[in-house]
Image (cartoon, helix red, strand yellow):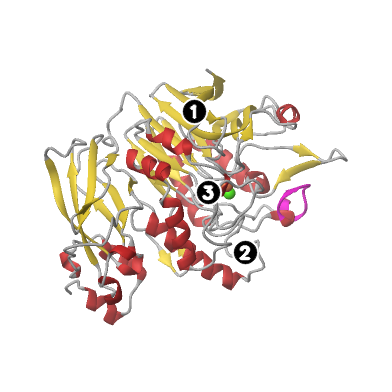
Amino acid sequence: MTFNRRTFLRQGIHFTTLLAASTLSASALGATRLARVSGNPFYLGVASGDPRPDSVVIWTRLARETLGNTLSRNEPVAVDYEIAETANFSTIYRKGSAAALPELGYSVHLDLQGLSPGKEYYYRWMIGGEVSDVGRTKTAPASDATPESFRFGFASCQQYEHGYFTALDHMAKENFDLIVHLGDYIYEETWGAENVRHHNAPEIYTLDDYRARYELYKKDLDLQAAHASAPWAVTWDDHEVDDNYANAIAVDEQTPEQLLIRRAAGYQAFYEFMPIRLPSGRQGASMQIYRHLQFGTLMDMTILDTRQYRSDQACRDGMKTSCDQHRDLSRTLLGEAQKGWLYGRLSSSEATWNVMAQQVMMGRLLRRNEQNEEMYLMDIWDGYPGERDELLARLKAASTPNPIVLTGDIHSNWVNNILSDFSIDNSEIIATEFVGTSITSGGDGSDISSTTAQTLSDNPHVKFYNRQRGYVSCHLSKDLWQSDYKVLDKVTEPGHPIRTRASFVVEAENPGALEA
Ligand code: FE
Ligand code: CA
């Protein structure tokens, strides 16, 4: 069968088929070629992501209002691209056309194939005489290569109203090999008392709502600079749909059916706006984004999803004392399919560093109430102790080389030794966890809070804790991992400088964090 758009329409559009089609050339879809557009259609920026040794996804999204009559005909639009090996495009390495589909809000995801490993490329988009900003990207090293070093940054939690994305502009200047985003890329709701910017609407529910929210965030020039600077590997957390949702269970007064309709909208908008490959499964409100990236023999990275498949938070969520539900070992954070896939990867990997890029804190965080009873945050791994024990036992049994956990969500910086048994101080260290603070969520923050001393004394496996905003810069070689905690004094004013607040290293074959 020949691929053309009418065939799709006649047969009823299946989202996955459509996504596959979006990577076909523009002509194969009979895309309309526009001689001119009204204004700059590329003001949402450019992006790239999910680098492999021979391919990387490049992305843009056309501003609808610049497309003129095409909009009313609901036709795919042809977008040209150029790839070069230098930023000035003095020699064009490759050029071609891709289709922006109206069903995907005129976003374009092009999976560039046949590239060389471990190499920088530059890309730009063109339509109707307009040219986008230039993006820099980089392929992953060859699977059997051992790069001397690899540098990446990771970030999370960028509530637009709480501050400026200055930290992302600082990330852009690092010229990273990769930027990892651990979720809460958008926020579906407004919270906080001293907001310096404002969302375009109250809480969002529909596909149009989510699209408009991503457009607001994507207009931010600091965010655009970070996307244009390096390939990203993204995952989502809760706020891409709804605060602390668990699978089909909403925090708001929504039925599971309502939450699933909302989740389908949130997930589709996420795909539309992110530089990711076609998710391998998309059925109704389900979309598999857990996946794996490999960076030579240096690093294997599993990118996890701790929201879509989890059991509901125990004991009605929040910071709680334990309850029967909390002790139910059948509860899951990852879901059976993802867990089986993850365990398989952790058992087979021979990479020096094995990174789990995920959302919620894995290190135990014990607090006590006024009656001196133990309390735990039910939304993080503490709320799923059975599955955490199982994962740690699995890492140990498989002798997974140098496990490193990367975490977002909690809007503060932490360095944690992940212990075989958190209740025993000198228990075996299984992994090292680096928890990165928010880009803006929570406002300016502070270095030390009134609870810092108690938190550290109750949790001796915690080696560092700080509540400022920023990101984490990681530098790894086959012998040493170093994480630099980069912080800003203020995000409620633009343009503040960044500084390294603390640095921790992990030596290969010697789990646990050491202050550098
Ligand atoms: Fe957050
Ligand atoms: Ca979160």
Closer to the camera, 237 or 77?
A: 77
SS at badge 3: helix
Counting from the top left corner in percent of width and height, residue 316 is at: 73, 57
Identify which amino acid the numbered label 3 is placed on: Tyr
- Which residue is under mark 3? 160
Counting from the top left corner in percent of width and height, residue 321 is at: 78, 47
Please, which residue is most extreme toward the front here?
A: 38
Identify which amino acid the numbered label 2 is placed on: Ile
* Magenta span of residues: 317-326
- Which residue is under mark 1? 498
Residue drawn 29% across the image and 74% down it: 74
Q: Can the viewer see residue 349 in this picture?
A: no
From the image, state whether disc 2 or disc 1 is nearer to you: 1
Please, which residue is most extreme toward the bottom here?
A: 10
SS at badge 2: loop
- Which residue is under mark 2? 249
Residue drawn 56% across the image and 37% down it: 437
Counting from the top left corner in percent of width and height, residue 298 is at: 36, 30
